[in-house]
Image: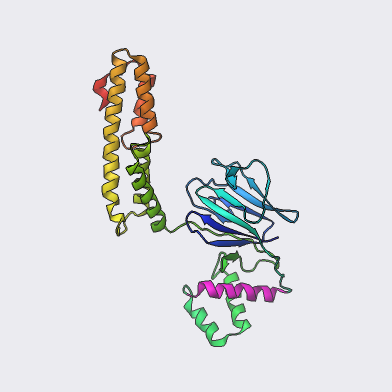
Amino acid sequence: MPFELTIAEGSGRGRRFRFGAVEVTIGRAPENDLLLVEPGVSRSHARIRAEGPGHVLLDDGSRNGTALNGTPIRGAAALSPGDRIGIGPLVFEYAPGRQKAVPGSWMLHAVRAARGALRTRFAAAPWRAQICVACGTASCLLLIASASVRGHDAGPKVVGDEVAPLGAPSGVERTAVEPAPAPAEEANAWFERGRRKLEERRVAPRNLYDAWKSFSTARRLLEGQHLPPPLDALPQLADTAERDLARDCRNLLFAARRFARYGQEQKAQAAYREVLLHFPGQDPSGCRERAQQDLSADAPTEENAG
């Protein structure tokens, strides 16, 4: 039974995907049917399987879990029209689709697939488009289909928002789509997240670290590219976040080591916990690792804080 997923929240909002396979896998790994290159998405994250007259949603043991209408699922969860499926930063809206008639022959299947190839490959293969515009016959479409099967257009062909591999047996509509945003779009999202976290640095201890991490990710995605406004502010903001992180590291470690040196063990432990809150992961100055080393050593001296 076919079904549709529409991105309701996140990058690519409004984009719709149709599926006709009995089971559709979702995750970061290339072998998945629905490929999501997004933060928080596991390699094998979730799957949707036909069961009875409808479909069920299952989590594949993902790190961040899969949500159905805002609630994490355990086991198989039956899907109803309008249900919202949360996977990483994306939310999809589920809708059952109508069963499509299966073409009665390979020729009709190839013609249908070739029409989709013509629609989506016009820019990439103008000479084929010109041929078809000139002749406008089914044999021309079959020519494209057979050329694609021989390897001239290897890979899935997109028909509107539906993906169906050419040359597949009748009735097979396995899909493989990647709704991940373009690097510039993704970088802009990380940039905006970094700016927001930098503005909220006093609200939570780790916001400055999150800002630096977001700016670093955006910088990596845009490496070697021209930065239009407002992204042209990225290098300065990234340097500011890194400099402030290094300063916070020095101050926090100095205080913790001072308490430890003078035997104020409880205050020292609290100060080291503060370091770990400010630095939840790796950073340029290695502050978290240095704090962890101090915790396993005897009375570190404050002179070594820098």
Residue visible at 57% across and 55% down?
34
Residue numbers of the magenta segment: 105-122
- Quick check: 302 above or below 193? above
Left or right of residue 7, residue 186 in this image: left
Q: Is residue 137 magenta?
A: no
Left or right of residue 34, residue 53 in this image: right
* Residue lying furthest right: 52
* Residue lying furthest left: 303
Quarter-of-image position of residue 106: bottom right
In this figure, what is the number of numbered marks? 0
Q: Position of residue 110 (x, y in %)?
A: 65, 74
Q: Position of residue 282 (x, y in %)?
A: 38, 36
Quarter of the image containing the C terminus? top left
Residue visible at 57% across and 42% down?
65
Q: Is residue 112 magenta?
A: yes
In this view, the residue in front, 7 or 279, is 7
